[in-house]
Amino acid sequence: MTTATTLRHRHLLGIRDLEPGEIDLILETALAMKEVGARPIKKVPTLRGRTVVNLFFEPSTRTRMSFELAEKRLSADTLGMTTAGSSVVKGETLGDTARTIEAMAPDMIVMRHASSGAPHQLARVCRASIINAGDGTHEHPTQALLDAFTIRERKGTLAGVRVAIIGDLIHSRVLRSNVWLLTKMGASVIACAPATLMPPGLRELGVAVTYDIDEAVKGADVIMMLRVQHERMHGLFLPSAREYFTYFGLTPARMERAAADAIVMHPGPMNRGVEIDSDVADGPWSVILDQVANGVAVRMAVLYLLAGGEGEG
Amino acid sequence: MAIVMDADRVSRSLTRIAHEILERNRGVENLALVGIRARGVPIAERLAAALKGLTGIDVPTGALDITLYRDDLMRHAVGPQPVIRRTEIPFSIDDRLILLVDDVLYTGRTIRAALDALIDFGRPKAIQLVALVDRGHRELPIRADYVGRNIPTSQQQSVQVRLVELDGRDEVEVEG
């Protein structure tokens, strides 16, 4: 694999559309962006005069703050819209919202939406570059990129790294983006969830599947814990949070089976005592706060790279 | 086309510049070198080695990537974005005399970007500019304090500086 010199598309809708060389370019650029965050003046004039709209149709704290910080560090003008108090609650359709925003001629739109494919719909209408900040249960590309950046920072590479992804997988866009990214970059992935929360078709993507957390953790270099998403569960998926923790919670005792220098990741927000024990979340394995810090650098890299060339669409 | 500086000439120029730096600043006390990526960095490192040879003192050396400060980045949103490399300035520039080092001085726009970038790192006592080649055609009121060689060029020509560290050999060529 050789590092790409440019991104082929002018949107970032999903990891699925990226080639390994493009992923490498984003991660390399993020390395330079991380250094900007360590300066006394954490701001560069790169996107001066560019307008970025943050459209969040779904609650988000860390992703929205992380994007806003990334935009501000690059000197872009930013404005945000969250559903509460917007015209969406008054019944405006996504298409009309998109056209309204398009009329204000922003350069980029960062979008979070509860429906899978919503940013793709926006990309068909808008001239602006669209960055998917999470769409339904489909993809969350910048999360997978910051996870990859964090793994590379700790392990030096993604190739050959053994990654266990454990938790509420069926509702997880983070899982999907991570599976695309990690398999493209040569990591080996094992997925673990209760049968009710395991999406079909993972094996076809080159992912090993288990229902036993001890098997998933065994020998893992990276353990990625995903949140139990109560808000997306309309039905009986789990008997109780306590039972889930007993069978699928990550505890210090379970960590003993992992590789000696294993790291634990979580995209947040965590449910302590449901998917992860506090002693693990706050323990020596945890890189959860590094993930947050790296998120800003990775999003700066994506904003910078998309602000440039007119890709093929 | 024409090789205007060979390895010997590059080497002699850098030695002379090292002497000029010492003479003008009466030593290396409080100096630091910052090379502009890509080719300013090895030149800064060679000057540091020359200054160490003359004085026995290590002059701190850093690398600056000015991509994020360029004034042409957003002018034509058609081409691919330049690849960004890391800036590494592992010392405080506050109250130091900074020797900013680049290979070719041309329009002065790179230096303008570098000055903006440097000043975001702190408040140096002063900044002096070192260029291996000055090819003229300034578009901003900027001049070098130390020049390896002045080379008259036309704007249609390009000047290639090659260095052992990056290109396998030392030479300066005027093309076109």
Image (tube, rainbow, N blue to C red):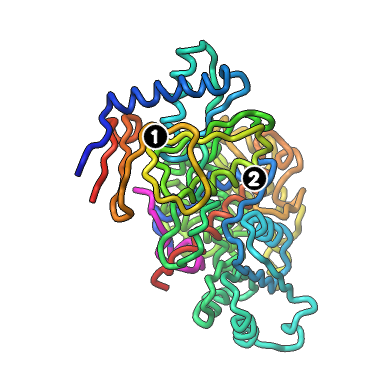
Q: Residue A294 location, x and y as percent? A: 61, 47
Mark 1 residue element: strand
Which label sits on residue A37?
2
Q: Which residue is mark 1?
A: B132
What amino acid is found at the position of numbered circle 1 in the picture?
Leu
Query: Residue A29 or A75: which is nearer the viewer?
Result: A75
In the image: residue A132, left or right of residue A189: right
Asked if the magenta segment contains residue B45, the reply would be: no
Q: Is residue B126 visible?
A: yes
In the image: residue A221, left or right of residue A100: left
Q: Residue at x 41, y 58 (%)?
A: A6
Mark 2 residue element: loop
Q: Residue A268 location, x and y as percent? A: 69, 54
Q: Residue at x 51, y 63 (%)?
A: B74
Chain label for disc 2: A
Quadrant in the picture for the N terminus of chain B? top left
A24 above or below A219?
Answer: below
Which residues lie in the magenta part? A1-17
Query: Residue A147 or B98: which is nearer the viewer?
Result: B98
Q: Main secondary structure of the magenta part?
A: loop
- The extreme right residue here reads A85
- Mark 2–mark 1 Cα distance, whole angstroms, equals 32 Å
- The extreme top residue here reads B56
Q: Residue at x 47, y 48 (%)?
A: B108
In the image: residue A298, left or right of residue B169: right
Asked if the magenta segment contains residue A12, the reply would be: yes
The crowding category of the residue bearing disc 1, from other C-alpha atoms within 10 Å (few below 14, some 14 to 19, many at least 20), is: many
Say if labels 2 and 1 share a chain.
Answer: no
Q: Residue B123 location, x and y as percent? A: 68, 37
What amino acid is found at the position of numbered circle 2 in the picture?
Gly
Chain label for disc 1: B
